[in-house]
């Protein structure tokens, strides 16, 4: 199913009416080439063009359409008219002159093996004169030569403003070749047609954490895989055309500048629509990815959610499938972290539900639509992406797209961060709220507790929720009684209060009396407000504090604490009357 969807995507992109968006035809590929050697018609080198752009030590080079490269293992295999400097120029960059000589000989042999008509091309003649009369020594005075010796980058040649490997004579005679001559035919598992089988599939490049030279999705390298003496490509037969199509499509989606690729934890995630729908693809990237302009991202998400609300995805457009593929490194191979294919209208509704689950009171500078990456780093130690728990991003993405309950490991990781750092941040509170509300929707938890609201809920009778509110109120009393205090009860008692309330709340309530006495001397109205607030909160807890809170109850504690803290700092447009018997939620003075 995955390879079939990628094959269909290639067919659509290869027929794109816009040439700039069209994928390479069979036998060609896009390759990043940082250096181009300019030649005159007589083979004299005119200089080296540096195509790299941007800043930093590893600046990306411009991408060019070149004959598809050969898959290299430990042996020597040259590409046609482009390759590393060792192959193309015969220079030794690894203190192994014998191997460098063999590599260069293989590169020259590829040119010699071209059909006679191609060898008569002016570009090939110029290159052969370069090798015969000038060689690499003629380039040693160029300013970038030292970098080429140090980095052994990919290079190619150009004559009169056109890459030699792109000249018509080369393109017309170049055909896709297998790594070894192999006329084995079989029914392709992707197309269903009888065709020559690709023995070694091309590398997939761009998966975060995988080998820089690329890795494979389809590969066999052990005797246990050679059922019925079928080795390598014969074991799972895919035609050369289909293998080229799916690898080209996937490498295009994983490209560095791709707008259809995001990083979800350790999973490099790509997505595409069954039919051409750039609006949806860009909207999906805005929902889950990071952008330089957060305001533009928010506008895109609002437009997408508005389209869902207005029924824009109903009908034929919404029936088209949307694909999401998450890939993670696994030694020399790539593992599929998650794969989701569902009609667009369902995914659009699930995305809207996702943001509804996350919605919670926040400060004006907090993002209205947080990205999944930021949410994942909020539950990682030190907020670093490298510390995100393995598989967590994929599990959350799968739950979002399918509308199912979120993994228990997510809430566990968030609550552990809250306790370790004694801090319930906006993203952590949103994460806990999403987990708890989604948990209620599925048996056997369908009647578990009251649904958590985005704002402070005075009607929520959950003891854990009220304990969180009580802890926030006690902390606020301490802050107002001791202005400028460096550390509050949160830094010392949050972990114990959220897991074993009975062990600390008696002490905290006793300390509260001292703080209220001090506060009443300066602001008796404020002290009275807190007395009534604590009375209203404790009224729903019971006769004694719980000895232990479960993981879900610790989540309710965190939300109660967060809600009450937000209420203290939120301006109320209509303050509740003190005559109603409920506390007055006042603006912080």
Image (cartoon, rainbow, N blue to C red):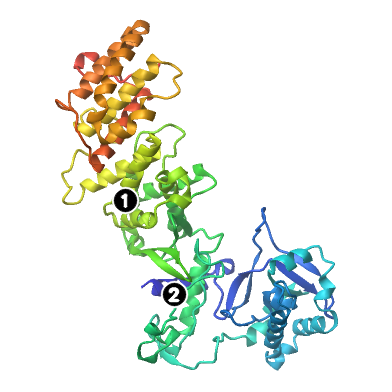
Q: Which mark is nearer the camera, 2 or 1? A: 1
Q: Quadrant of the C terminus?
A: top left
Which residue is most to the left? 543
Q: Closer to the camera, 332 or 548? A: 548
- Which residue is pictured at 24% across the width and 31% down the height? 501
Residue 521 percent coordinates (x, y): 35, 5
Task: Find residue 43 and report its image quarter.
Answer: bottom right
| Residue at 24% in and 39% down | 553
Q: Residue at x 33, y 14 (%)?
A: 515
> x, y percentage for residue 367?
44, 39
Above or below: residue 535 compared with residue 435: above
Q: Using the image, tell me which numbered label, if any, was put on residue 7.
A: 2
Picture coordinates of residue 452, whole percent (x, y): 26, 38
**Residue nearer the viewer, 72 or 13:** 72
Mark closest to the chain's N terminus, 2 or 1: 2
- Quarter of the rendering occupied by the N terminus: bottom left
| Circle 1 crowding by C-alpha within 10 Å: few under 14, some 14–19, many from 20 | some
Q: Closest to the observer: 337 or 320?
A: 337
Q: Is residue 246 visible?
A: yes
Q: What label does residue 409 carry, if any?
A: 1
Eyeballing the image, is 303 above or below 398?
above
Work out whether 333 lies above or below 269. below
Residue 284 position by quadrant = bottom left
Q: Is residue 331 left or right of residue 432?
A: right
């Amino acid at each position: 199913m995955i390879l079939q969807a990628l094959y269909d995507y290639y067919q659509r992109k290869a027929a794109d009416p816009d040439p700039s968006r069209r994928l390479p035809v069979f036998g060609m590929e896009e390759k990043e080439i940082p250096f181009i050697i300019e030649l005159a018609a007589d083979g004299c080198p005119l200089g080296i063009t540096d195509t790299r752009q941007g800043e930093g030590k590893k600046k990306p080079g411009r991408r060019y359409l070149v004959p598809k490269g050969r898959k290299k293992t430990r042996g020597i295999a040259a590409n046609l008219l482009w390759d590393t400097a060792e192959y193309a120029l015969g220079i030794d960059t690894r203190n192994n002159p014998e191997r460098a000589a063999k590599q260069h000989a293989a590169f020259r042999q590829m040119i010699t093996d071209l059909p006679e008509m191609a060898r008569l091309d002016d570009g090939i003649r110029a290159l052969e004169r370069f090798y015969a009369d000038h060689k690499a020594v003629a380039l040693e005075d160029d300013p970038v030569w030292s970098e080429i010796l140090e980095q052994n980058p990919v290079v190619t040649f150009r004559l009169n403003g056109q890459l030699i490997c792109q000249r018509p004579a080369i393109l017309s005679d170049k055909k896709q070749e297998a790594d070894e001559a192999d006329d084995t035919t079989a029914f392709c598992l992707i197309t269903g047609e009888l065709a020559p089988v690709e023995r070694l599939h091309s590398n997939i490049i761009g998966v975060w954490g995988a080998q820089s030279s690329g890795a494979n999705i389809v590969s066999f390298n052990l005797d246990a895989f050679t059922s019925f003496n079928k080795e390598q490509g014969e074991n799972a037969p895919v035609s050369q055309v289909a293998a080229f199509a799916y690898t080209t499509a996937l490498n295009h989606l994983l490209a560095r500048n791709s707008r259809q690729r995001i990083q979800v934890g350790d999973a490099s995630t790509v997505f595409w629509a069954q039919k051409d729908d750039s609006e949806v693809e860009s909207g999906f990237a805005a929902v889950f990815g990071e952008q330089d302009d957060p305001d533009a991202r928010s506008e895109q998400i609002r437009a997408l959610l508005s389209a869902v609300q207005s029924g824009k995805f109903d009908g034929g457009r919404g029936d088209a499938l949307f694909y999401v593929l998450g890939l993670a490194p696994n030694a020399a191979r790539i593992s599929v972290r998650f794969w989701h294919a569902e009609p667009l209208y369902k995914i659009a509704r699930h995305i809207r539900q996702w943001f509804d689950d996350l919605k919670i009171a926040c400060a004006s500078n907090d993002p209205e639509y947080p990205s999944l990456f930021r949410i994942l780093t909020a539950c990682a130690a030190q907020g670093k992406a490298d510390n995100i728990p393995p598989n967590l991003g994929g599990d959350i993405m799968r739950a979002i797209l399918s509308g199912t309950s979120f993994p228990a490991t997510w809430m566990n990781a968030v609550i552990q961060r809250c306790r370790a750092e004694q801090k319930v941040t906006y993203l952590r509170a949103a994460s806990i709220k999403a987990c708890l509300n989604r948990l209620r929707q599925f048996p056997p938890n369908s009647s578990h507790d009251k649904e958590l609201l985005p704002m402070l809920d005075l009607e929520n009778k959950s003891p854990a929720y009220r304990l969180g509110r009580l802890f926030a109120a006690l902390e606020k009393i301490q802050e107002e009684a001791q202005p400028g205090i460096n550390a509050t009860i949160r830094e010392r008692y949050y972990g114990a209060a959220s897991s074993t309330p009975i062990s600390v709340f008696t002490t905290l309530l006793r300390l509260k009396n001292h703080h209220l006495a001090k506060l009443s001397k300066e602001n008796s109205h404020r002290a009275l407000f807190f007395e009534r607030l604590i009375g209203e909160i404790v009224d729903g807890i019971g006769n004694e504090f719980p000895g232990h809170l479960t993981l879900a109850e610790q989540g309710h504690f965190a939300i109660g604490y967060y809600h009450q803290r937000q209420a203290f700092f939120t301006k109320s447009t209509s303050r509740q009357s003190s005559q109603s018997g409920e506390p007055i939620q006042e603006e912080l003075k």
